[in-house]
Image (cartoon, helix red, strand yellow):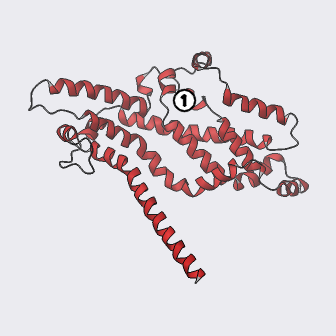
């Protein structure tokens, strides 16, 4: 009887728990659905229905306006280039720094780790950073978007802790066989670190794709703007065009400013959303193992 009561109580708890989680998941999806619906809605419908699940008269006006600019595809390619190259550079620099810091016999390891942690709390600031980039001759260069923040301190610590969890016996056995540190790093540590590399790669890729302030600071040439800065300019222009069209009469076609904002959100987040499922299986494992202090 006790087993049956426990079984019934467990089933009831699971049913209530699943129901609440499903309802909570649905409520979190409503804002995303509203953004998608607004991107396909007309100006009149957006004014009449501030919140919608599906537009009554779907239109591609907002997307046509975004893709009508000649520089949009170029900005997308620039963002893709910075994301791919920048993520690769980040992973290389982070991994090459994390491996020696994970070695307990490294001379001055404690001092180096204190210096690394120090950068998490203090930084030079925006103006010194700009002067540094200018002195390096990287103004209007895409490398200013790639090299700035080449190593994230948080990601470095996660990678170091992950590598420390790899058994020392594997490295010692390789050293006995005459393997060099570079061989151990490439042939032993690197294959075992794929989960954490996928996790950090996702972190770095999202950061590069969403880069906005650095592009405003270091890129003066509009032909080298990434998609985030370009979409901001498109939204500003759309607001001006919408106001000017609205003053011409009721028959004028008004470009939906809210629709353009929503379409911009969809366009700017869609590439990362498409990449995430491929890395999701490594994400939780890598973040959990790397976050545990070794």
Front one among 144 and 156: 156
Q: Position of residue 179 (x, y in %)?
A: 85, 52
**Residue 235 vertical placement versus 168 (above, below):** above
Q: Is residue 189 left or right of residue 12?
A: right
Which residue reaches farthest front? Answer: 1
The quarter of the image holding the N terminus is bottom right
Q: Is residue 77 above or below residue 182?
A: above
Residue 24, image quadrant: bottom left
Q: Residue at x 78, y 35 (%)?
A: 113
Crowding near pointer 1: few (<14 within 10 Å), some, many (20+)?
A: many
Q: Mark 1 sits on what residue?
A: 145
Residue at 33 percent across and 44 percent down: it is: 35
Q: Is residue 167 above or below residue 15?
A: above
Residue 84 x %, y %? 54, 41
The location of residue 117, given as percent across then percent down, is 72, 32
Q: Secondary structure at mark 1?
A: helix
Q: Could you tell me residue 6's position as x and y percent?
A: 57, 76
């Amino acid at each position: 009887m006790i087993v049956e009561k426990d079984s019934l109580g467990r089933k009831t708890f699971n049913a209530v728990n699943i129901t609440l989680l499903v309802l909570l998941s649905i409520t979190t999806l409503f804002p995303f659905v509203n953004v998608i619906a607004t991107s396909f809605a007309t100006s009149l419908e957006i004014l009449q229905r501030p919140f919608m699940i599906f537009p009554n008269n779907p239109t591609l006006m907002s997307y046509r306006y975004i893709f009508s600019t000649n520089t949009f595809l170029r900005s997308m390619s620039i963002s893709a280039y910075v994301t791919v190259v920048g993520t690769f550079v980040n992973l290389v620099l982070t991994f090459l720094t994390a491996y020696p810091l994970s070695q307990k016999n490294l001379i001055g390891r404690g001092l180096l780790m204190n210096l690394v942690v120090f950068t998490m709390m203090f930084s030079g600031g925006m103006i010194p950073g700009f002067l540094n980039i200018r002195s390096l001759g990287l103004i209007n260069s895409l490398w200013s978007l790639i090299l700035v923040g080449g190593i994230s301190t948080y990601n470095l610590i996660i990678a170091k802790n992950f590598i420390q969890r790899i058994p020392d016996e594997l490295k010692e056995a390789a050293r006995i066989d005459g393997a060099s540190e570079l061989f151990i790093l490439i042939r032993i540590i690197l294959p075992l670190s794929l989960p954490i590399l996928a996790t950090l790669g996702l972190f770095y890729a999202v950061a590069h794709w969403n880069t906005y302030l650095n592009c405003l600071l270091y890129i003066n040439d509009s032909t080298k703007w990434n998609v985030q800065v370009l979409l901001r300019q498109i939204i500003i222009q759309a607001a001006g065009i919408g106001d000017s069209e609205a003053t011409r009469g009721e028959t004028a076609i008004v470009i939906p400013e809210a629709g353009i904002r929503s379409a911009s959100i969809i366009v700017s987040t869609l590439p990362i959303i498409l990449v995430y499922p491929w890395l999701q299986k490594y994400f939780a494992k890598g973040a959990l193992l790397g976050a545990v202090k070794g």
